Image (cartoon, rainbow, N blue to C red):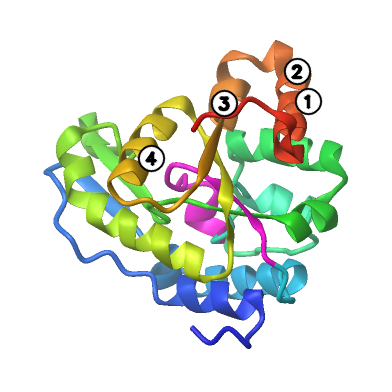
Amino acid sequence: MKKDRSLAERIIEFNCNLRFGGKLPPGFAVLNPYLTNPETLVVMKQFYHKFYNDHKPRKFIIGINPSRYGAGITGVPFTDTKRLLSYCGINMSSAHTHEVSSVFMYDMINSYGGVNKFYHNFYINSPFPLAIVRLVKNDHWLNANYYDDIDLFSCVKHFMIETLQKHIELGLITSEVYVLGKKNYTFLKQINKEKPMFKKMLVLDHPRFIQQYKSKEKQKYIDNYIITLSGIGNMHD
């Protein structure tokens, strides 16, 4: 990637070239919205041109892997179509989605100071940046995390390391990164030990966990996010 290009152009190039060609355990599948919905490419490009059209390094917030109703549709991490429109001003007409992690994330972003301020400072993505689904009863597919199955993790681990390195090459700050989800942190800490990429890793509770199990204490978690992202949270080396 040419460093003289804007961060937006580098991110868009990364997304447009995303392919996972590895094998998966039986019952798992990967969804790539950039290959299945032409409008995903359109709105993803609009988002990054709007908020990342500069050369400023961003701090890195690391998720798990996208939800099929969040970035699995919009191409924008932790962003469903509702918040893509209401907060980011970008309409997606081919899909209409509600994703619980997106609700928390944008409430936090609003408290932080809004989308312009937040995205000027932070870049969010995942070590496995495509949606993973798992087949359950009656031919029904559910969201899955890369660490839900040890064989699944073994299958995607190399791709995850390559992806993290490509994220870093975009021009991200690596002295301190923010990991969403305690189990995610455990696995990424292991990867970082084997293949050092980040000097310090700070862990935050995952938005889905907060929305699903701690909604009555939501403001406390929002406050903790803002304190941690401001550089005075609890550190995990």
Pointer 1 with pointer 2, Cβ within 8 A: yes
- For this orientation, the residue located farthest to the top is 216
Q: Disc 1 versus disc 4: distance between alpha carbons?
A: 24 Å
Pointer 2 with pointer 3, Cβ within 8 A: no
Q: Disc 3 versus disc 4: distance between alpha carbons?
A: 15 Å
On the image, numbered disc 1 is attached to which residue? 223
Q: Nearer the viewer, mark 3 or mark 4?
A: 4
Q: Which mark is residue 134?
A: none
Q: Which mark is residue 205?
A: 3
Please state if 153 lies on the left or on the right of 65 as rendered.
left
Q: Disc 1 versus disc 2: distance between alpha carbons?
A: 5 Å
Percent position of residue 54, x then y: 74, 76
Q: Residues within 10 Å of mark 2 (few under 14, many from 20)?
A: few
Q: Residues within 10 Å of mark 1 (few under 14, many from 20)?
A: some
**Residue 69 colored in magenta in the image:** yes
The kind of residue on which mark 3 rests is Asp
| First reached walking from the N terminus: tag 2 or tag 4 | 4
| First reached walking from the N terminus: tag 2 or tag 3 | 3
Q: Residues within 10 Å of mark 3 (few under 14, many from 20)?
A: some
Element type at mark 4: helix
| First reached walking from the N terminus: tag 1 or tag 4 | 4
Q: Residues within 10 Å of mark 4 (few under 14, many from 20)?
A: some
Element type at mark 3: loop
On the image, numbered disc 2 is attached to which residue? 220
The kind of residue on which mark 2 rests is Lys
Q: Which residue is at 37% across, 30% downward?
A: 186
Seen in the picture, residue 151 relative to 168 is either above or below; the reply is: above
Percent position of residue 234, x then y: 63, 25
**Residue 205 colored in magenta in the image:** no
In this picture, which residue range is highlighted in magenta? Answer: 57-74
On the image, numbered disc 4 is attached to which residue? 188
